[in-house]
Image (cartoon, helix red, strand yellow):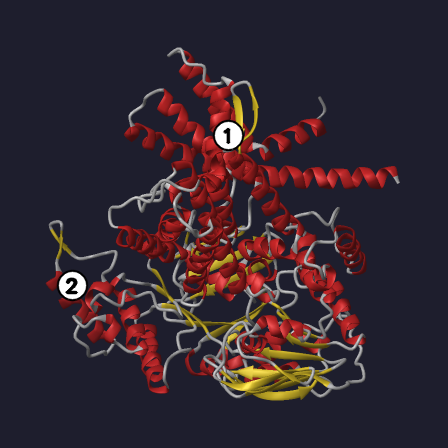
Amino acid sequence: MEREKLLEFRHVSKSFPGVKALEDINVDLYPGEVHILVGENGAGKSTLMKVLSGAYTATSGELIFEGKRIEKNSPHISEALGISMIYQELNLVPELSIASNIFLGHELKKGCFVDTRAQEKRAAELLNEIGIRVDPRTLVKNLGVGTQQMVEIAKALSKKAKVIVFDEPTSSLTDSEIQELFGIIRLLRERGVGMFYISHRLEELFKIGDRVTVLRDGRQILTDTIDHMTMESVIENIAGRKIENLFPHVRKEAGEPLLEIKSLSGDKFQDVSMTVRAGEIVGVSGLVGAGRTETARAAFGIDPYTSGEVYVCGKKLAKHNPERANKLGMCLLPEDRKLEGLALSLSIRENTVISSLRALNPTGIINDAKERREVQKSIDELEIATSTMDKLAKFLSGGTQQKVVIAKWLMSQSKVFIFDEPTRGIDVGAKSSIYQLMDDLVGRGAAILMISSDLTEIMGMSDRIYVMSGGTVVGELDQRQATQSDILQLAFSNV
Amino acid sequence: MNALTKKRLTAKLCSMSTIIIVVLVFMVFAIATATTGINFLKPSNLSTIMNQASPLVVLGIGQALVILTGGIDLSVGALMAFTTVVWGGFLMDDSTTPFMVAVVGVLLTGGLIGLLNGLMVTKLRIPPFIVTFATMYACRGLGWVYLRNRVIYPLNDSFRVISTANLFKIDRFIIKTPVLIAIVFLLVAWFVLRRTNIGRKIYFTGASPMAARFSGINTDRVKIGVYIASSMIAAFAGLMYVAKLNACEPGLGTESNFEAITVALIGGFAMSGGYGNIWGVAGGALVTYTIQAGMNSLQMPSELQDLISGGLIIFAVFINQILANKRMELENDLRDEKAIQTVRKA
């Protein structure tokens, strides 16, 4: 039986300057279907849903809703058509009642006043439909996360939603709340609501999904019904692609441990221990929110931690003191280069020397000739593409900016490098030269801890791999024995 | 004229925004006052403007340092009043203690208040606006409590030299000590900001506080340092003012904090931090004072003067912002082209 399609993406592509976020996506949705979207972080799931909600405009391709093309989408239009989004972070106003939240923006009115009583009555009906028993006058701040999510669903229903998008709905729910949510999703399915469901929890897709679409690097890898798939085949497709010869890294003889993190615990991570030896590149894999960046920031001293110890070159680091960590030869190349790695309004020269000022100018007075010589040396060595060292950092490309950050740390004689997503947003050409640099660094006896969400990068560059999930280290693998699906399975193990 | 020269010229013009504003302001008042029969540009008037604007230059340098790190210091005016009132006794004509004791005392008290400001901003993480706002009231109040409604005068003549002595004189064009002091302060500030490690750290902290921390700069120490410097500089400016007035009183400098901020903003400093050239402060002070003097000589009512000053700040900041961005882009282009040409020649 050929059912009428509710929604269809036809050849949808979306580019941002320098990146193709989506490439020729063809996904459709039938009434009463749960269509699951999976993929690594940055694969394009959220971008696709933002095209649907109208937050982004597709570069090319079209969006068909109930047989009609949506000409010019916007959050307002998609909402009016009956497309509702339920995000991981809920969008409710904590100080307002459930009823006021449900009707926020489309209040029931009597004349020009809000008809509170009618809203409460209707809200009670909606909550009843999805089987939730709470007083609609309760303030949202007094509800648990699970119930808040139900309020979001009631809100979607109040707008007569035909399509509901769930973006990681279960990430902060307890088991019983998840069961309740699944109950409601099944109810919505019976009522013919089409649903997109984004999740990192792969076991959920077999419990609730009808069809699955796997995205990778902005491309649609496959779309198929759930009966045709197994956990293994899904993981394989998520990880996918063969390792190209992008990675020059050759395993070196590992020396003394240069970085030792011992049972570090803080807000977002518990009991994390890691060791990196001289000559080693150690990868840290895991999903976004697994606590990798938080661990690195705390170890380096940007954020405080509650317990544990960090040793650099055998010396214990003081808590919350990046200055001291720097002096001992440790550095952190942050994920957000523009905000945390560079002062964009200053020049390459000023950015490069900032951590070596005392060594370059021991009297405190700037030695112009010496500084210029040293900076030029770095520019030549790292092949930084620029006309002059006086160029402001904001005029450089992402890859060149990353090289300037590396130049800063090379100049300061650092021995321990933490790279947080070293190649995010960088084109392939610059990527391979950054990999080459990393290999050179460990060749000279440095130790590198590399946080990356790119599995190929992890597999291609690491000697050893730590996998983090839910704030703890769930596994340590030797690269020679590890496979991408091992890593993925570990990464999903403690979500 | 080819495109390159044109670009070079525009870049130059953009970098001289403060000078252009100075010239514009002088022209406006020269024309406006000419209609009433006053010669605004006569030597005696010009030298007066330079002498009177000088303490403002000093004050503006302190403010500029704080603004460079992304902060603000509203307490400078009240601090001037408080420190000079507390130590004013030693500055009196009939005091038996050497006046240098008072000078050192004023500077140290100023530095202490700056330290408090800095500690509250960095360690207690209270926004600078609120911290210095509170300090402003506290200092002013303490000054009144200490002195009641008395005024300390007359002051020691050898102390008053810092404001009153003539340096040189060509007919009616008389340059006094404050001008020299302002120039010395400008030179020192320029040297520290552009030629020392400390200067590098100040600019970096302001341009990107997060990147500064990741680069191993103790940003708290940098910020505390600039608050101390700003307060000590303000305390020194306070000495210049009381020497000129020949009296210490708790009502000194009620407008000074706003004037200092105006000077820095017209001088091209960005409130967001990390951008600005210290020489701009000289221009900013000239403009700020010239407008006051000019409007006074036109006998404008003070309410109207305030209105015009307000409008001018908005205008100057707006122009500076546009020009700063334009200049960065133009200079970037020019650097690229210059590099290409050097390669071609080689």
Front residue of this view, candidates A283 and B67? B67
- Residue A171 image offset from top left, x and y in percent: 42, 77
Q: Mark 2 against mark 1, which lies toward the viewer?
A: 1
Front residue of this view, candidates B251 and B335? B251
Dividing the picture into quadrants, the one containing residue B157 is top left
Label 1 neighbour load within 10 Å: few <14, some 14-19, many 20+: many
Above or below for A465 versus A248: below
Q: Which residue is mark 1?
A: B50
- The answer, for residue A285, to whether it is visible in the render is yes
Chain letter behind tag 1: B
Front residue of this view, candidates A77 and A5? A77
- Residue A4 image offset from top left, x and y in percent: 40, 63
Q: Are the numbered discs 2 and 1 placed on the same chain, yes or no?
A: no
Chain letter behind tag 2: A
CA separation in Å, label 2 and label 1: 70 Å
Above or below for B26 versus A351: above
Give left or right: position of B45 versus A359: left
Label 2 neighbour load within 10 Å: few <14, some 14-19, many 20+: many
| Secondary structure state at the residue bearing disc 1 | helix
- Residue A358 image offset from top left, x and y in percent: 69, 63
Q: Amino acid at mark 2?
A: Gln
Q: Amino acid at mark 1?
A: Met
**Which mark, residue A119?**
2
| Secondary structure state at the residue bearing disc 2 | helix
**Which mark, residue A308?**
none
What residue is at 67 percent from the left and 27 percent from the top?
B6
What residue is at 71 percent from the left and 21 percent from the top?
B1
